[in-house]
Image (tube, rainbow, N blue to C red):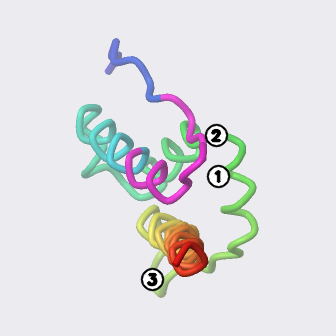
């Protein structure tokens, strides 16, 4: 089935990687739904993710060194998304900690 849906841009961390990730992940999930791939096999969803995510996320995905869940042929898309959620949460915590530190310094 051919589609004329334009692809979403590759992930760019920008100045707030945590926020950029949340927005990109939402866009990606909407894109999967629009393509009617949300119910597709895991291999298809993961392939679409790898195709769209960009080099920055591909490098990080390799660094996670994820292992397939029991009964799965490969790493699921959900596993990858959860690892990125945890990874980018650290950025959010780091930004908040920096903000608090600067707030204390100003007092």
> Disc 1 vs disc 3: which is toward the camera?
1
Task: Give the residue number, with chain letter if any, for mark 3.
Answer: 71
Task: Give the residue number, with chain letter if any, for mark 2.
Answer: 54
Residue 62 screen position, x and y as percent = 73, 63
Above or below 26: residue 87: below
Residue 37 quadrant: top left
Q: Secondary structure at mark 1?
A: helix
Residue at image coords 32%, 36%: 31
- Residue neighbourhood size for the residue with mark 3, other residues' Cα within 10 Å, grouped as few (<14), some (14–19), many (≥20): few
* Image: magenta residue range: 9-23
Q: CA distance from mark 2 to mark 3?
A: 29 Å
Q: Is residue 74 visible?
A: no
Q: CA distance from mark 1 to mark 2?
A: 6 Å
Q: Secondary structure at mark 3?
A: loop
Q: Would you say residue 17 sits in the magenta stretch? A: yes
Residue reaching furthest front? 107
Tell me: 12 left or right of 89.
right
Residue 49 screen position, x and y as percent = 50, 46
Mark 1 in CB contact with mark 2 (< 8 angstroms) = yes
Above or below 30: residue 86: below
Residue at image coords 47%, 75%: 72
């Amino acid at each position: 089935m051919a589609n004329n849906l334009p692809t979403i841009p590759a992930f760019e961390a920008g100045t707030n990687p945590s926020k950029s990730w949340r927005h990109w992940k939402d866009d990606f999930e909407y894109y999967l739904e629009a393509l009617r791939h949300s119910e597709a096999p895991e291999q298809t969803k993961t392939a679409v993710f790898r195709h769209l995510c960009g080099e920055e996320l591909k490098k990080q995905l390799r660094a996670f060194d994820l292992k397939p869940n029991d009964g799965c042929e490969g790493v699921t898309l959900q596993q990858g998304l959860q690892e990125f959620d945890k990874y980018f949460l650290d950025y959010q915590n780091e930004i908040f900690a920096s903000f608090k530190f600067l707030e204390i310094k100003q007092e």
